[in-house]
Amino acid sequence: MQDFSIIITAGGTSSRYGKTNKLLEKINGKTVIEHTVSKFIGFKNVREIIIPANASIISELEQIFNQPQIKIIEGGATRQKSVYKGLQKVTCDYVLIHDGARPLISTDIIQKCFLETSEKNAISVMTKTTDTIKEVDESGKIIRTIDRSKLYNTQTPQGFKTSVIKEVHEKLKTENYTDDCSMLEELGIPVFIVEGEYTNIKITTKSDLDFAKIYI
């Protein structure tokens, strides 16, 4: 199996969550970011874990993580800039990029990401949309119902051949994308899906944290 670098994004301000940084909230005595990182630690092919973090929590993260395998760096002003900084530290030929606020990712999905990234060079974990989706105009009137059979919800990890994602970030570094796969799509580079799990939520609100506590 190919060696992988892991980038775990932690550069956000948690503005939608509240006054505290959601990554430092505790679940069963461990912070959210600890739960997330722990999911990647056990794989023998993971050579390094890079955490581009908001400057306000770097000191806390340095106290939590003291393994040489984990590198904590200061992130950028946007998610794209944080990932770009993380990519400058990557030493492996392949990389997974994962949200620090997704502590419920399963080891089975991570394993699938390793295999699919090695074969296809660009993948994203996704789940089929189960809700009925409506297109609505500015007045609030429903225009149409969109066929959901081809619609998927995007999650992370997203996996890439390192040379591919680095080149994409260089070409689009003046833009502001919130999703790495969207950058490849913009340049016409194929991205393939890995079927995910509906429990792999991103903690955005306090109710999300409550769900994660119950699930863990």
Image (cartoon, helix red, strand yellow):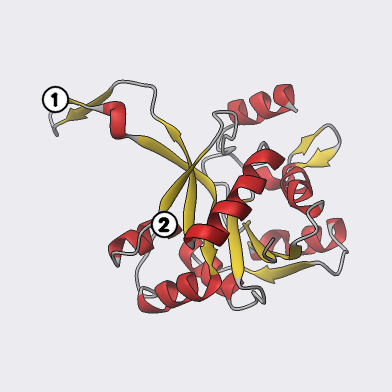
The amino acid at mark 1 is: Arg
Q: Which residue was labeled with disc 1?
A: 144
Relative to 2, is 34 above or below? above
**Could you tell whether 150 is left or right of 58 in the image?**
left
Mark on residue 65?
A: none
The amino acid at mark 2 is: Cys
**Could you tell whether 153 is left or right of 5 in the image?**
left
Tell me where residue 120 appears, x and y as whole percent. Answer: 48, 59
Residue under the point 75% across and 69% down: 71
Q: CA distance from mark 1 to mark 2?
A: 27 Å
Tell me where residue 197 appears, x and y as whole percent. Answer: 56, 32
Place residue 174 in its image quadrant: bottom left
In the image, 186 versus 36, the foreground residue is 186
In the image, 187 versus 26, the foreground residue is 187
Q: Secondary structure at mark 2?
A: helix
Q: Quadrant of the C terminus?
A: top right
Mark on residue 181?
A: 2
Tell me where residue 207 appears, x and y as whole percent. Answer: 60, 25
Residue under the point 71% across and 41% down: 107
Q: Secondary structure at mark 1?
A: strand
